């Protein structure tokens, strides 16, 4: 039945979320409708196609819509909710589920794997010294993949194999998967604890409740919606590393182009650039990388999109259009060389442009350039990072490969501490992947996916243990988490 409220009781009835959304306390009843009893309001129905309609009013200046309050149905309640199904999200979801927690995994794309799959990355960096779930995934990518995947111990992989392996592991572990679903809000209680997230999808606007949450969105979307402080890029203008569009190619014999294939050695990049520039092809990324994946399939990274904000849909759209155009132009240019290249063609460009940098959510420890220079050793280390400082050029001028100015203090292998995965400003929220707490220079090293998986594994395990013990993640020490799970 409809519920009628006075203006005063309605204000008490609703709690305002960190993102400015309104969440009704009747969430547990998806059939509850607020409004005039004479007004028929249809509720969401996945069979008939009925939707939860939006009501609103256009402001006098025509610049805003004042959205009316509405009851948002609760789609699920679990011990742990993981936002983002990329490498970090996979580590978090699997670790939490295997520790006995009920787990909901939300992903905006139509597959799991994030940049590994939708982004066509095809190469996993800084994975060789990792154990646990990262080592397990590499083994499966190698076993299920080509001879090249086996020769590289799974670090060069087939994105389609990765999609299937990740789905199988999640299903086997009991993870509840929801694809095609985007986070749009977060709800805190009066104690500043995260209690729900809001999403939009073909199923409409929905709420998801959990005991603990893990932000594996890459761009720190959940942390931002929850009201956490964060940092972006470097300098007053928040300059970020460029984005890159990757592609899959076919039509060439690997034996005929062997000197240009990355796995033959680092010199392959320079040879490929020289070949391109010698024939009037000027790639926006001056370290073009061609990898042979299997049979006649290759991956290509030869694109930089500069000055694009990860939070500006219009800018990302234009970058995607420009990048795809450049990839096709480069392939067409190589094909015109004839010979070994005469049948070169594009099989696919990435559904998701590669984003190197978004928000860095403030945690209870911040990894710094000084930590890298000193080779940080921490008693709550969840993994050790060995990848170098890797800041791609921030603009088109000069060197279009990397910015060496950020390397001046050097780097040694360093620890990633558990407190860097725990949000500082909101309780019940953990972080994993490139959105963890660190400065610009440190981020350029730990951001690679070989580190994302163990970070996710640690965050997922921490969330599961916190849920089991009825405490908050920051109240646990990493050694306690590991011993509880073992």
Image: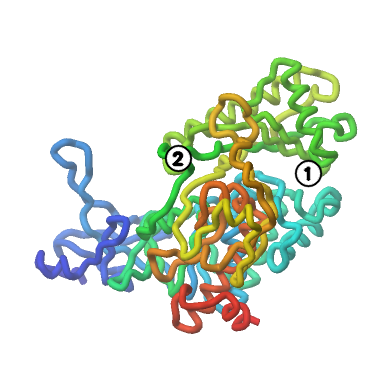
The answer to whether the residues at label 2 and label 1 have Cβ atoms under 8 Å apart is: no
Secondary structure category for the residue under label 1: strand
Q: Position of residue 463 (x, y in %)?
A: 51, 73
User: Which residue appears at 64% of the width and 53% of the height?
Assistant: 449
Query: Tag 1 or tag 2, which sits nearer the N-term?
Result: 2
The answer to whether residue 260 is left or right of residue 132 is right
Q: Is residue 351 visible?
A: no
User: Which residue appears at 57% of the width and 75% of the height?
Assistant: 478
Up the image or down, 96 lies above or below 228; here it is below
Q: Which residue is mark 2?
A: 235
Q: Position of residue 361 (x, y in %)?
A: 45, 56
Up the image or down, 266 lies above or below 106; here it is above
Q: Please name whichever residue, 125 or 416, is drawn nearer the observer in this view of the structure.
A: 416
Secondary structure category for the residue under label 2: loop
Q: Position of residue 369 (x, y in %)?
A: 57, 51
Q: Which residue is mark 1?
A: 293
Quadrant of the image occupied by residue 65: top left
As measured in the structure, the alpha-carbon distance from the residue carrying label 2 to the one carrying label 1 is 39 Å
Q: How many residues crowd mark 1 within 10 Å: few (<14), some (14–19), many (20+)?
A: many
Q: How is the image coloured?
A: rainbow
Q: Please name whichever residue, 275 or 71, is drawn nearer the observer in this view of the structure.
A: 275
Quadrant of the image occupied by residue 245: top right
Quadrant of the image occupied by residue 356: top right
- The label shown at residue 469 is none
């Amino acid at each position: 039945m409809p519920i009628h409220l006075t203006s005063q009781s309605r204000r008490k009835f609703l709690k305002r979320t960190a993102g400015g959304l309104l969440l009704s306390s009747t969430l547990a009843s998806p059939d509850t409708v607020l409004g005039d009893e004479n007004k028929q309001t249809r509720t969401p129905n996945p069979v008939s196609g009925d939707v939860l309609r939006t009501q609103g009013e256009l402001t006098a200046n025509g610049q805003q819509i004042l959205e009316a309050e509405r009851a948002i149905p609760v789609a699920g309640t679990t011990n742990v909710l993981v936002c983002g199904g990329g490498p970090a999200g996979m580590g978090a979801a699997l670790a939490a589920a295997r520790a006995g927690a009920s787990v909901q995994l939300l992903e905006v794309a139509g597959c799991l794997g994030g940049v590994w799959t939708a982004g066509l990355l095809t190469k996993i960096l800084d994975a060789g010294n990792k154990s646990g779930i990262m080592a397990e995934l590499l083994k499966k990518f190698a076993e299920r993949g080509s001879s090249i995947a086996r020769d590289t111990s799974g670090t060069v992989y087939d994105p389609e194999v990765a999609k299937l392996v990740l789905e199988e592991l999640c299903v086997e572990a009991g993870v509840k998967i929801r694809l095609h679903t985007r986070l749009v809000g977060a709800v805190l209680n009066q104690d500043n604890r995260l209690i729900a997230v809001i999403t939009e999808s073909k199923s409409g606007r929905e709420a998801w409740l959990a005991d603990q949450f893990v932000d594996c969105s890459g761009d720190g979307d959940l942390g931002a919606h929850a009201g956490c402080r964060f940092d972006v890029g470097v300098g007053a203008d928040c300059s970020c590393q460029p984005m890159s569009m990757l592609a899959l190619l076919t039509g060439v014999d690997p034996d005929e182009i062997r000197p240009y294939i990355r796995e033959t050695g680092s010199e392959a990049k320079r040879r490929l650039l020289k070949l391109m520039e010698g024939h009037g092809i000027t790639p926006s990324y001056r370290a073009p990388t061609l990898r042979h994946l299997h049979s006649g399939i290759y991956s290509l990274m030869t694109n930089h999109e500069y000055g694009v904000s990860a939070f500006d849909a219009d800018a990302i759209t234009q970058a995607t259009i420009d990048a795809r155009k450049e990839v096709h132009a480069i392939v067409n240019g190589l094909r015109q060389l004839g010979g070994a290249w005469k049948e070169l063609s594009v099989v696919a460009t990435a559904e998701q442009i590669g984003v190197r940098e978004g928000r860095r959510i403030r945690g209870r420890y911040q990894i710094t350039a000084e930590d890298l220079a000193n080779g940080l050793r921490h008693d709550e280390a969840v993994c050790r990072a060995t990848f170098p400082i890797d800041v791609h050029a921030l603009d088109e001028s000069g060197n279009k490969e990397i910015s060496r100015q950020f390397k001046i203090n050097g780097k040694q292998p360093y620890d990633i501490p558990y407190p860097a995965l725990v949000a500082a400003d909101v309780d019940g929220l953990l972080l994993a992947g490139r959105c963890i707490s660190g400065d610009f220079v440190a981020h350029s090293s730990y951001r690679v996916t070989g580190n994302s998986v163990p970070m996710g594994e640690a965050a997922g395990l921490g969330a599961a243990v916190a849920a089991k013990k009825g405490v908050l993640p920051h109240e646990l020490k990493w050694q306690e988490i590991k011993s509880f799970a073992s």
